[in-house]
Amino acid sequence: MPQCDQFIEHLLTDSRKLVFPKTSLFFALATVRKNGCVFVDELYHKGVKNFVVPSEFHTGNYPDANFIFDDHPVNSLQQLAAYHRGSFSYPVIGITGSNGKTVVKEWLYQLLHTDYNIVRSPKSYNSQIGVPLSVWQMSDHNNIAIFEAGISLPNEMDQLQKIISPNIGILTNIGEAHSAGFADKKQKATEKFRLFSNASVVVCNADNALVESIANDSGVPLFSWGKRSCTLQVIKIDKSASNTTICAEHQNNPVEITIPFTDDASVENAISCWCVLLYLQVDNKTISERMLRLTSVEMRLQLKKGINNCLIINDSYSNDLSSLNIALDFLQQQSGNQSTTVILSDIAEAADDKNELYKKVAESILHHGVKKFIGIGPQLKKHQHTFRNLFKNECHFLNATHDFKNHFSLTHFKEEVILLKGARAFAFEEIDLLFAQKIHQTVLEVNLTAMVHNLKEYQRFIKPSTKIMAMVKAFSYGSGSAEVANVLQYHHIDYLAVAYADEGVELRKAGIHTPILVLNPEEVTFGLLVEYNLEPELYSFSILQSFAAYLGLQAINQFPVHIKMDTGMHRLGFEMNVVGELMNFLAKNKCLVVKSIFTHLAASDDPQHDAFTFQQAARLNDAYNSICSILDYPVLKHISNSSAIFRHPELQYDMVRLGIGLYGIDNIGETKLLLQKVAALKSTVAQLRKVAALETIGYNRKGVVNEDSLIATVRIGYADGFSRKLGNGVGNMSIKGKFAPVIGNVCMDMTMLDVTGIDVKEGDEVEIFGLNLPVQQLANWCNTIPYEILTGISQRVKRVYYNE
């Protein structure tokens, strides 16, 4: 019989984010790609017993589950959130507008969190699904709420208004973003204003005649700001190199704030926040002090190094006039004395008159001192005369992204700052890849088919109930992160592990949605961990307390973490004598959810240390049992690395960590695995020369030829990861299936080989390691381990992937 008295605490719309199955209600939402009903069976077997599904869903296989039938489950999600909102009477601030919603929300939090217990939208949860999930966070512990609301079509705001029902409204601005769904700006502004239909006051910029007109027609009391007669009348705005001072008049009294920003968008956002604080009767001195301490909110602009000493600003998240101006400000700020280039796509979302729109674009680009402009898209090409009339510097116009790839040489871009600003439909990531591409005849070939084979080989020896975590840290042991992770994800690996947060960010950007463990989290990367849903390893009270404090400031609950115990490795981890203190902390801090408790074996591949290995396992078991006794949800336990999978199968537990074995290297040599080599490092012969007997080769004349010899110079050196230890006859390379010894010192970019007696010509392929010369052999010559050889391969070495 279904259980009808269960208490629901968590609303679940994504099966991958399940943490508390017993108290979760899953909404089987349908998307363009997949129907949420396909996850019901998986979630049911994980302990979820409460579901909202369409009426045609067959419930016969789930006898003890509760089902609510709704052909549009999102409606139930929204109705439940609206009912929940009605349980609280404290002030709710609702924010909408074309731009600046998240910044205003986060700045209000910075300005008010010392006075209020604030609940607010996580990040930019402002959609038809994000808003109800945000409002569901409201509790009796809070005394003010701040929520964003975003719409892209008419009539969407009515439902969000019922859910948020704000007492205080903020309209940030009305710009071009998300205009395509509306007939004109007036319709868009009118639709957005529906959020405030029952509000006690609305903050808005009365200098915008359209906004002022709609606001006055609404009948809602206004807290207006602007240069004309308003509630807060702006008298003067003074900008210095790093600050902006805003002088105004409120209730016939002069007031003033200074903010540590100079761009126009920040000024507008700060004034909106200022109005809210004045409405809440925060005193002027406090407002001034807090405004000066505002910090920037993480935006979507990316700045990175590119080819030919260029800097690349990639802002391809959205494309409208407002965000273009923000990006151009950033371009100008970062360029210094360097030349600037803008590569822009059609502004597809704008509903303005196209002639006027692209005139504004051209004027803005001209105003920001851009030296070269490349427009991509039929609309930009159609309006190229507008740019040519205004923009006298170099400009080009193309129909599509592939035209840029086909017609522009990357040698045309040198020592400049390049802004990529494109709507998603134009796939500017392809251009971004061009600028990031490294050209080098030395390549690392990665056989993805062989990697899949190796994974399946390991799976034959791992218990069906045991999960697998694949180690893709250090650029997947030098093989390339995103490409390897994509293959592992396709074959349903349970977890990925990286060393640092930026590695995980790159995987998320590449479309990896598999859970990712970050082994070495740093405090400066907490924002990245949260933004990209990366799960940190917490190994000390310092990092644990700092991360918990950060989550508290961000109003984030139940964020997944992993607890590392030090059971004898003595590298990272909580000592065994602090387990009790750790239990107390975890019991009090509900912002954290422990996904796993684990340790690292010090010598699992060495039989003489087996007793110590089992001692480590016993210590982990003690810590795990103690910690789990205060947790009311399942937690994974893992200890086994690649060696322990075979040598100690009883230690496979809930999950194993599979590392270098995936890459075809068996570091214990006692298994029945039929592993295949995954990576092969290859280069080419740059030059051949005949050298007479007793001549010397290379730096310091270390290489001496005893007879007339044929010497090949190969395009690889220690800057590529070919160790100097391999010089002077220590190492060899394979050419035409024959070993050729290194002669002389290894250079930074080149290495010389004695190829006397080998039929070789310039341009021939040379194998540094691969099928003919195992990487283990290179490691032996260097007196090291294969890990060091693989991870030492330079990033400038091009990776080429094969799927046979």
Image (spheres, rainbow, N blue to C red):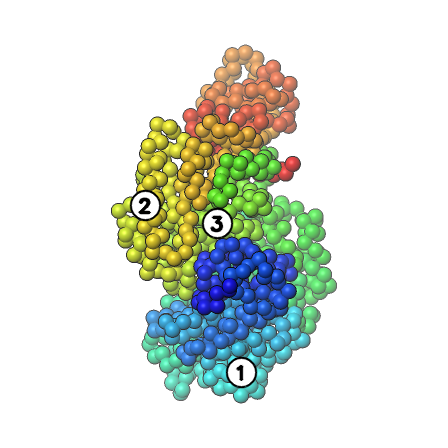
Q: CA distance from mark 1 to mark 3?
A: 43 Å
Q: Note whether 111 is above or below 570 in the view shown.
A: below
Element on which disc 1 rests: loop
- Foreground tag (3 vs 2): 2
| Residue at the (62%, 37%) spot, across then down | 802
| Residue drawn at point x = 36 percent, y = 56 percent | 631
Return the disc, 3 or 2, that comes first in the chain's sequence. 3
Residue under label 1 = 197
Is label 1 in contact with label 3 (beta carbons under 8 Å)?
Answer: no
- Which numbered dot is residue 158? none
Q: Earlier in the sequence, mark 1 or mark 2?
A: 1
Where is residue 499, by image quadrant? top left
Percent x, y for residue 262? 46, 67
The x and y percentages for residue 562 are 40, 50
Q: Which mark is residue 622?
A: 2
Drawn side of residue 599 relative to residue 191, left or right? left
In the rendered image, residue 47, in percent from the top left (x then y), is placed at: 48, 57
Q: Residue at x 48, y 35 (%)?
A: 660
Residue 516 tag number: 3
Task: Compute the Cα span from label 1 to label 2.
Answer: 58 Å
The amino acid type found where label 1 is placed reads Ser
Classify the position of the C terminus by image quarter: top right
For label 2, the SS is helix
Q: Is residue 409 visible?
A: yes
